[in-house]
Every structure is written in structure tokens, then in C-alpha cells.
Image: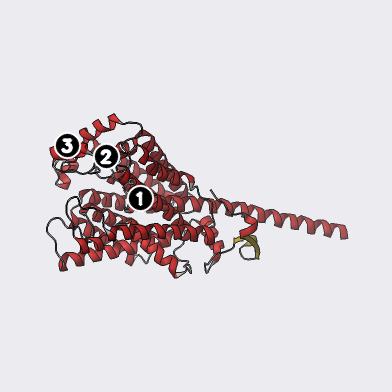
Amino acid sequence: MAIHQPSRFLKTRHAASRGPMHVEPRGESYRDGPHDQELRARTGRTGSHVRFERHWLLYVASVFFLLHSMSVLSIVERSIYGEWVGKPGNKITETLNLLGIFTSLFLFWWATDKIRIARVNRVLPLAAASLLLISVLWSVAPGVTFTQGLVYFFVVLGAIGLAEAWDGDELMDLVMLICGLSAVASIVQFFIFPEPGDFRGIFSQKNVLGQVMAGGVLAGLHGARIRGWRPFRSICVITLCTTVAFMSKSSTSILTIFVLLWLGMLGKLYLKGGSTRTIASCLAIVSVAIAIFFMLNADLIFDLLGKEDTLTGRTLIWPHVIEKIGEKPILGWGFYGFWSPSNPLVWQIVKGLGGVPTAHNAMLEFLLDIGFVGTAFFSFLWWRNFVLAVKCMNGPAGQFGVSSILLLIGTSVIGMSEVVLLPPLQIWTSLFFVTGFICEKQLWLARAARRQGMSGVAVVNARSQLAHARLAGKM
């Protein structure tokens, strides 16, 4: 992991109103400078109220990266070529993936070369992405594993650049904007170019649409919390995304949105401190008890959502998936390898169960693709991000820490009936890595600010003692 040397990138300046001495990284294009980031890290604000001056190319690259990683651009390929069962890749797909790779490389280069201000652990996330790519060595479909693994690796690389280049609040604003515009575009598509079947908007499936709408609610909640008495835009996006999620009839996403709304309210109460923090903690405990009750009585959830107890055929496939996991438990069948059309075992399962294409459960899909080794690695990353988010919530970036915890809980809810964190072009995958990096960056900045503050106090004390000594000598 490359770390810039302080002697090359740091300079000092005197700021009477901000402390006796300040260390400022060079190469920043921010109006208020990196000092404001460290100041916000001390006070728990990641600060959308402070706007950054960024190069337009960085902004365009960030927008394209998010659009691509959310699968928003799939509407382009669908509009030109149409769709059918077993449709192979085409020039549009290849071009978008190639542009995604170059965009990720650009974001990584920009952040590393120009604006890197904090040390974050890049090794673990890149090692996880590399493990997916390396599984081509034992995959039953090496070509598919290599292609999907390469896309995943560059999504993680782009997430590093995005986290380094953006302030947390502004990044959530950008996510909220993209999700909101996706909701508007989906509604327009529904009324102008209606399609038979489930409402899926500009996305390939209704579940993908629902997940992006849940991501929009998450980002909207973050914006509403940090804006205080001016949350109108955030509330509009939350309402719009929730409405579109109901239109999609994606039960998992609707349930996730309700969980995010409830826990978002608890997070807001918790950060107020005092008695409200105690109330929020008690309500959180009650929420966990209610969640356990519903998990033990799943039929109640199915009745509330109007779904059958097989989750539209999902549970019927789980015994077959568990059986196949047992055949290759250590390393799995290879990333995206088992469900490849070239694997004859897939057709046996699909033929018997009516065409279910995936395990429809995150944990089972992890075990099927990369075995217990890979599943343990990604589980460690999830818990590591959770610990970082809790530290942020109770430390330098309270609001962003709450949003990070909500994101991790959201992935767990969706993972009960959908594959999450494994698809490279899924909103939760990119945000999982980005939020983890940003939380780690905020914690590093807070530690640096504390060390800097202690150094400043030591300088003042030394100068004061020297002045007293000189005064005593003159007397």
C-alpha cells in the first residue's frame, strides 16, 4: 500500500484562530482546504455545508462510475438490442464495461496522485476482489469468472478513488440525485413506453429497480439528517423512491425501506445525546426483539407482504444449492461459475424448479461461488466496516456513521432473499466499499487532528515556559 511521505506533501501554516500550528496537505483543490476536513472530523461533521471545487472531469467520472455500478445504463443496451432469455453480451455491454474500467483507473489515479489526504487500508478490499478473480483457476466456467471478476476488481478500485476524492456528505448527495433521477426516468418510461409484465423502469429487473430505490432512500435519509431545517429535497427523494419501490412490487426492497426509515429515525435520536440517546437505545433493543420474533414466525411476514411461503420459488431451490455447496465447500465453484449456461448442472436444477437463475440468498451464493474461505473473508470485511461505522457514529463523523450502519443492515435484509455484495454492478456493492473507506478516512483524520492539536498545545506550553524563563532572567 503506497503512502505518500509527509515531507513531500505537507506544509505548515500559522492560524491564530484555529490553533498555533496546522499541517496542510498540498495538492488540494478545495476552497476551504483540508483543514476544514480535519475540523469537521473533530466536531463530527463531514460537512455538505462546505462545497468543494473539483475539476469537471472528476465530477463526470464520478457520475459515470455510480451510474455504471448501479446498472442504470443497462437501459441503453436494452433499448438498442432488446432482450431475450440467454442473450449474450454485445458491443454496448463491452463498451460500457471498458469505459467502467477506464473510469475506475482514472478515479484511482486522480485520488492517489492529487488529493490523497488519509491512510486507508486498500489491501483487504483489493484482496477480496482478487480472490474472486483468482477463482478462475478452479471455476467450472473460467471465461465468465474472469470477466465478472475483472469488473468487480475495477469497481473496488473505483470505490477507493471515489472515497478519497469526495467528502462523505457530498457523495451521499450525489447518490441521492442519481437515484432520484432514476426514479423519475422509470416513471416516465412506464407512462410513455409501457412494457408488459412487472414494472422495472429503466432497469433490467424489478428487484434491481427496488434495490436502487432503497439506496435512494438511504441517501435521502442522510441528507435529511445533515440539513436540519432544510430537508425538503431529501424528503422529496425519499417519497419518490418509496413510491417507485411500491410500484415495482419488490417485497424485499419495500421491507428494506421500512427498516431504513425506522432505524434512520433511531439514529437521529441517538445522535442528539442525553435522554434521547437512551430512548433510541431502548427502541433499538425492542426492534431487535421484534426482528427475532418475525424471523421465528416468518409466515407473518409473508402474510403482511402478500407473498407465498416459498418466496416465489426461492426456498425450493435452497436444498439443491446446499447440496452443491457440500460438493465443493472450501473454494466453491468459482465466481459466477455455477450459474453459467455452460454448466450442465444448472439446467437440471432450472428444469426441475421452473427457471430460478440464482440461489436468491446472499450467504448461500457466497458459499456456492467462493466456498467457506471466500465467505469468511467477506464476512470479516462486513464486520470490519460495521466496527468502523460504529466508531464514526460515536466519534468524528456521527451522521455518516449512522448511514454506514444503515447500509450494512440494509444489505443483510436484502441478502435474505437476494444476492447482495457479489454482483459487481449493484448499488450495494459499490456503496459497501465506498462507505467503508470514507469511515476509515474520517477516523484517520480525527486521529491526525488530535495528534496535531496535542503538538500545538506542546508548542504553546514550551513557548510560554521559555518566555517566563527569560522574564525571570531579566528580573
Which residue is disc 2 drawn over?
A: 338
Q: Tell me which label, 1 or 3, sits earlier in the chain.
A: 3
Residue 127 position within the rendered picture, expressed as x and y whole percent measured from the top left: 44, 43
Q: Which residue is at a point 49% across and 59% down the rendered structure image?
A: 109
The crowd level at tag 1 (other Cα within 10 Å; few <14, some 14-19, many 20+) is many
The crowd level at tag 2 (other Cα within 10 Å; few <14, some 14-19, many 20+) is many
Q: Which residue is at a point 28% across and 56% down the rendered structure image?
A: 212
Q: Is residue 269 visible?
A: no
Q: Tell me which label, 2 or 1, sits earlier in the chain.
A: 2
What is the CA distance from the residue labelled 2 to the residue labelled 3? 12 Å
Q: Amino acid at mark 3?
A: Gln
Q: Nearer the viewer, residue 447 or 90?
A: 90
Left or right for 113, reference 142: right
Which residue is disc 3 drawn over?
A: 348
Disc sitting over residue 126 in the figure: none
Which residue is disc 1 drawn over?
A: 429
Q: Nearer the viewer, residue 278 or 326?
A: 326
Q: Which image quarter: residue 162?
A: bottom left
Q: Tell me which label, 2 or 3, sits earlier in the chain.
A: 2
Residue 295 position within the rendered picture, expressed as x and y whole percent measured from the top left: 24, 38
Residue 475 position (above or below residue 357): below
